[in-house]
Amino acid sequence: MPSENLLDHRDLQEPLILPTNEKSNGPEKLTIDDMLQKYCGEFGKWQLRHFILTSLAWALEAFHTMVMIFADRQPRRLCTGPGCQTHPEVCGLSPGSWEWVGGPGSSTVAEWGLVCANKYKVGLVQALFFFGCMIGAGIFGHLSDSSLGRKGSLTIICLSNGILGCLTALAPNYSIYTLLRFLSGLSSGGVGVCAFVLATEPIGPSKRGVAGMSTFYFFSTGIALLSGIAYIFQSWRSLYVASSIPSIIFITVVIPFISESPRWYLVRGKAKEAMEVMKHMAQVNGRTIPQDVELVVDDNIANKSKETEVAEMPAFTLTAIMLDKFGRKPLTIGTMWFSGVFCLLGSMMKSYGIWKILRMICGILGIFGMAGTYNLLFIYTVELFPTVVRNAALGCVTQASQMGAILAPFVVVMGTRFPFVVFTVCGIVGGLFGFYLPETLNRPLYDTMVGMEEGEAIWNNA
């Protein structure tokens, strides 16, 4: 009897522990945006370094795009015969009465006589370059979403630009020169698509907009540096070599320190590689990711295999899927891209030479406004589409913008006032299309189509 009371008393003092084979709490599952905000930091030292290194590719794009301004310029002429001063142009002057300042090797115009009846050939080279950019944007937009990846695509683009630029310097005639410029356009068209996405995807939602707008400072810096390079290298052939070598240097010196996008890793089913990038990011930023944290796509990996198959589809099939899945989004944003670049380049060309102060001020303000619109379109497009088709979508709308770049010079030559009417109407129409698209401010970058649909449903019902 006393023993029974003792046992009863002991049982009341000790808690009853039931055996279990499961943990009370499973691993914490987070999307990349959640992990950036909670553990890694939205824009720390790692993102700053990665952003700067990746955005250097924009300066290289400026080299390859704007080099034609210096290489295809018409140099000044030096009069050597009577009556030369009365002719502002070389057309109609007798042979031997003038010569090009800097010699025939100073530009393609001087070397191949692209003046008078052949003056149109200068514009033809420029149009074909932008036509190549239009095709290349679509090609590399699709490749960077597929197994090649953002970093792999950027590496191939820079290598191609470097090689083709050096080969252009060896062009024996105008026809080969035109062909090489077209091929350079194919690779140059993918620089912005790959560099912008690769630079901004590892950045948190609240910092992504500011960082995205800053990428274009690198393009402007590239133009300024190219002016200095052109001042040093007076020959157009040496200028092409000097502006192409930095692309080779970029591959060997910079690319090894650039990381592949963790978002691309994740949607490709490489969660381990994505987690390694995030852990290194947190370490450099002075933070730590707990051991029980797991990266997941925004649809809980329910459709991971399906989304991976989508990225592997041919470009035309992928475009059809985007039109079907996203409705009017691709066409609407594509129209805005076309009108933005069409108005920007047209206004820049038409404002050149305006002498009245009021028109000059209006022209400058218009150019600033359109340039800001162009920058915002990059950020907006990235936020409109999920990771699995983000670069492909950006490539498609960039193709629309290149069409605007091709058509703008033809409108400029139509008269004095008519071009301004066309650019104004086109800009207003493009702006109105923006009312048909959703707001993306402070919203996450979605990984999959299913995740985007679910996320937009939540935001719309909030």
Image (spheres, rainbow, N blue to C red):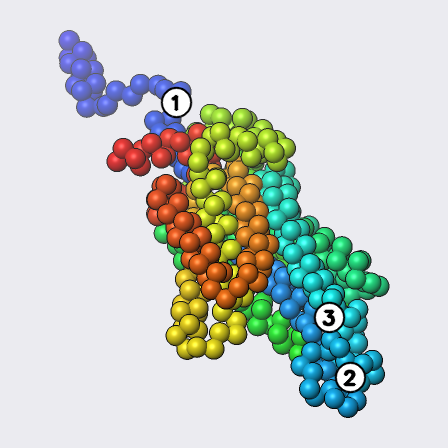
Residue 158, position as x, y percentages in the image: 67, 55
Characterize the local packing of mark 2: few (<14), some (14-19) or many (20 or more) Cα atoms within 10 angstroms.
Answer: some
Q: Mark 2 points at which residue?
A: 98
| Residues at marks 1 and 3, CA–CA distance in whole angstroms | 82 Å
- Image side of residue 351 versus residue 98, left or right: left
Labels 1 and 2 touching (C-beta < 8 A): no
Q: Mark 1 points at which residue?
A: 22
Q: Which of 276 and 24 is in front in this view?
A: 276
Q: Which of 141 and 353 is in front in this view?
A: 353
Helix, strand or loop for disc 2: strand
Does 62 appear above or below 399?
below
Does 448 appear above or below 71?
above
Q: Nearer the viewer, mark 1 or mark 2?
A: 2
Determine which of the numbered discs, if any, sits on residue 115 in the image.
3
Residue 134, position as x, y percentages in the image: 61, 49
Look at the image and tell me in which quarter the N terminus lies: top left
Quadrant of res 188: bottom right
Helix, strand or loop for disc 1: loop
Helix, strand or loop for disc 3: loop
Residue 331, position as x, y percentages in the image: 48, 40
| Residues at marks 1 and 2, CA–CA distance in whole angstroms | 92 Å
Instruction: Give the amino acid type for the residue marked by disc 2 in the picture.
Output: Trp
Q: Which of marks 1 and 3 is in front?
A: 3
Q: Which residue is drawn at 41% across and 37% down?
A: 30
